[in-house]
Image: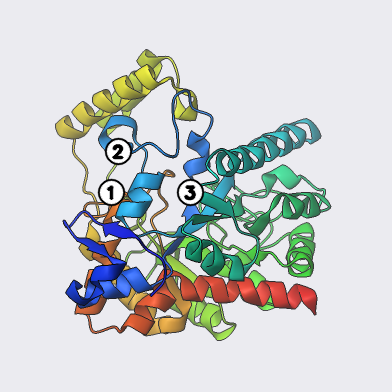
Amino acid sequence: MKFKAVLMCSLGLALSVGAAHAQTPAQAAHAEALVLDTHFDTPANFHLPGWDMMDRHDYEADGSQVDHPRMVEGGVDGGFFVIFTPQGERSPQADAKARDAAIVRAVEIHEMVAKHGEAFALATRAADAAAINAAGKRFVFMSVENSYPLGQDLSLMQTFYALGVRMIGPVHFLNNDLADSSTDPKGPEWNGLSPLGRRFVAEANRLGMVIDASHASDAATEQMIELSATPIILSHSGLDAVFEHPRNIPDDLLRKLAAKGGVIQINAFSNYMVPTPKIPEREAALADLAKSIGAGGRDMTPAQRKAYLEGRNAIDAKWPVPRANLDDFMKHMLHAIEVAGIDHVGVSGDFDGGGGIEGLEDVADYPKITERLIAAGYSKADVAKIWGGNALRVLKAAEDGAAR
């Protein structure tokens, strides 16, 4: 059995390696799998005053969903920690500012690992995950969400590779110089990838980076599947056949992804799973709240964040909107397995980036997914593929492709 000294999950489970005979099938499957999430937005918390990865935080108190204690509780062995840069103006000056911000975020990830070297280790190859896990630590892969920081200089991909990045996505909410987004209100600009975006695919292949098509338009995703010499990934996405949304992938494209060896990591983002009506009074109240707090996004002080969360909870109570739950998540998961096959599906909560649904509030809840998979008739081997085996296979393929 792989190293997991103690697994305590939100269902009240408590087990140790020495007491394996007392485990339920779901507990045993979860403990033996190498459990990883391909999209942690948690690095955005690393610079916040007083926030530390080794403290156990509470989602209701500070909105965070990933830290070391909750990773231990959820039996989560590691994942891809994201360098995210929101899309801004497309100009040389803005590109340079985005580049610098992304490099700072990469350094913050390294600083977190260095500060907590007893608990975390940086991973740059697929084989590192098992080795770090065997040493009793959590592995930290690095990824880039939105390659806006590259501007028009693809040589920066080498810079980010040298910093440890092994997964990279071209685009986010809005179109950029590389690709069309699935959600830009202006519609497509390039009809998929730009000419620079096509060279981006080739450079990712050369370096050995996994290409992440989450947030890309269907046309851009299809072109990445076709152009890439190695399998690509959707690090946090859902299924259009289950809930129609531009961020979700249609079945025909999912089949093409799987046919080339790719993987979809099922997302736990409520707006992409159930209808979320716009309520004008609610939108106005949220805008007034943000204005009254005097700060927004990740730059709030602990006191501002606490006040904002309390205000948001009051607004949610007054103007509630539907919220997805674990049943909705499993509909996406099981449909993806049916269409793509067990070798092409994984998990990402999109935690600390807007994800989280009823029943999956943070990483401590992850054993619930294993329970559902075992109850649906899937084996330990199937669970191991979904929780990490499939994503690591794609990373290994990128490594081997670069070596060739």
User: Closer to the camera, 87 or 333?
Assistant: 333
Q: Is residue 52 left or right of residue 274?
A: right
Q: Callout 1, which amino acid?
A: Glu
Q: CA distance from mark 2 to mark 3?
A: 22 Å
Picture coordinates of residue 61, whole percent (x, y): 28, 30
Q: Residues within 10 Å of mark 2 (few under 14, many from 20)?
A: some
Please tell me in which quadrant of the rendered image residue 274 appears. Answer: bottom left
Q: Is residue 266 left or right of residue 225?
A: left
First in sequence, mark 1 or 2: give its number.
2
Q: Are marks 3 and 1 in contact (CB under 8 Å)?
A: no
Please tell me in which quadrant of the rendered image residue 167 appears. Answer: bottom right
Q: CA distance from mark 3 to mark 1?
A: 23 Å
Which element is circle 3 on?
A: loop
Picture coordinates of residue 81, whole percent (x, y): 54, 50
Above or below, 339 relative to 356:
below
Q: Callout 2, which amino acid?
A: Tyr
Give the residue at x 51% y 47%: 118
Tell me the residue that label 2 is attached to.
59
Picture coordinates of residue 199, whole percent (x, y): 79, 63
Q: Residues within 10 Å of mark 1 (few under 14, many from 20)?
A: many
Q: Callout 3, which amino acid?
A: Ala
Work out whether residue 338 can be spotted: yes
Q: Are marks 1 and 2 in contact (CB under 8 Å)?
A: yes
User: Closer to the camera, 355 or 363?
Assistant: 363
Give the residue at x 32% y 49%: 362
First in sequence, mark 2 or 3: give its number.
2
Which element is circle 1 on?
A: loop
Mark carried by residue 361: 1
Give the residue at x 57% y 59%: 216
Q: CA distance from mark 1 to mark 2?
A: 8 Å
Tell me the residue that label 3 is attached to.
119
